[in-house]
Image: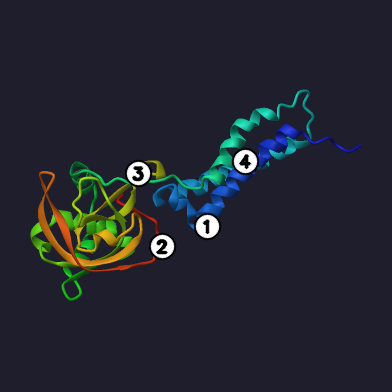
């Protein structure tokens, strides 16, 4: 006699293996970095493995009959998963942080000795900021006003136009993730250029300019005086990570 499948257990297995598959695929293709900080990836690999193990132990129950199967109640779990697939990313708050937050991030970010050696050796006295190094250079430039005043800098950034800026000003911004996409914010340098009016919000540009430290909102911060600017392809990694 053919055994009847327990539909409730089948749905439970589908949810477990489905969630595990989503985790593993996102970890392999790198999309998980749009949602959580890379330091949590090992934990997520473990979480996916636990889901698979739980599912394996549940398989023997697949053919055990149950008097009252309650499949519809699992909709409360399935619907959020479907919503996650439909809306794949959480929008970052498109707002530059205050100087108070500048200081907070800088105080909590540690620069190791290898980074310090890199800061001491510049090519032709130009800071060439690689996409993945924006965070450490952001902190280094804010911390060492005397060292970098007048130094040229080259970097790939997104354009952000904030209320309160002058017509010739924009923010050369990157999205920052501390833990997950829900806490992602925008950090960047104030830039001044006669071509600011040509820029579109959120477009990617390569900026070359000179760093000067000036007062902004009652604090001395680096201002980039743009000498050259051109459109650019987006950075491979959408987010940067301070911790």
The dot on residue 28 is 1
Report helix, strand or loop for mark 3. loop
**Callout 3–callout 1 Cβ contact below 8 Å:** no
Mark 3 to mark 1 CA distance (whole Å): 27 Å
In the picture shown, does residue 24 fall above or below 127? above
Residue at the image position 13 percent from the left and 44 percent from the top: 217
178 or 117: which is nearer to us?
A: 178
**Farthest-out residue, right:** 1
Q: Which residue bears the numbered disc 4?
A: 16
Mark 1 to mark 2 CA distance (whole Å): 15 Å
Of pointers 2 and 3, the one earlier in the residue sequence: 3
Residue at the image position 20 percent from the left and 55 percent from the top: 169
The dot on residue 130 is none
Expressed as whole percent of the image width and height from the top left, the position of residue 44 reads 49, 46
Q: Circle 1: is it few (<14), some (14-19), or many (20+) Cα within 10 Å?
A: few
Expressed as whole percent of the image width and height from the top left, the position of residue 39 reads 39, 50
Of pointers 3 and 1, the one earlier in the residue sequence: 1
The dot on residue 93 is 3
């Amino acid at each position: 006699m053919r055994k009847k499948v327990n539909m409730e257990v089948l749905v439970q297995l589908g949810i477990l293996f489905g969630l595990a598959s989503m985790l593993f695929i996102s970890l392999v293709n790198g999309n998980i970095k749009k949602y959580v900080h890379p330091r949590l990836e090992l934990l997520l690999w473990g979480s996916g493995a636990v889901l698979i193990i739980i599912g394996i132990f549940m398989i023997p129950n697949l053919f055990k009959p149950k008097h009252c199967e309650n499949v519809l109640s699992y909709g409360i779990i399935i619907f959020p998963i479907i919503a996650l697939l439909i809306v794949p990313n959480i929008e970052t708050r498109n707002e530059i942080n205050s100087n108070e937050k500048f200081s907070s991030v800088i105080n909590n970010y540690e620069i190791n000795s290898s980074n310090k050696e890199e800061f001491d050796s510049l090519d032709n006295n130009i800071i060439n900021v690689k996409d993945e190094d924006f965070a450490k250079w952001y902190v280094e430039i804010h911390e060492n006003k005397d060292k970098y005043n007048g130094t040229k800098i080259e970097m790939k950034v997104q354009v952000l136009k904030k209320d309160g800026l002058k017509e010739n000003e924009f923010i050369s911004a990157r999205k920052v993730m501390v833990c997950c996409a829900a806490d992602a914010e925008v950090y960047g340098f104030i830039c001044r250029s006669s071509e600011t009016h040509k820029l579109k919000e959120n477009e990617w540009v390569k900026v070359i300019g000179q760093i000067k430290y000036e007062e902004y909102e009652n604090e001395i911060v680096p201002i980039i005086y743009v000498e050259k600017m051109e459109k650019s392809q987006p950075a491979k990694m959408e987010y940067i990570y301070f911790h």
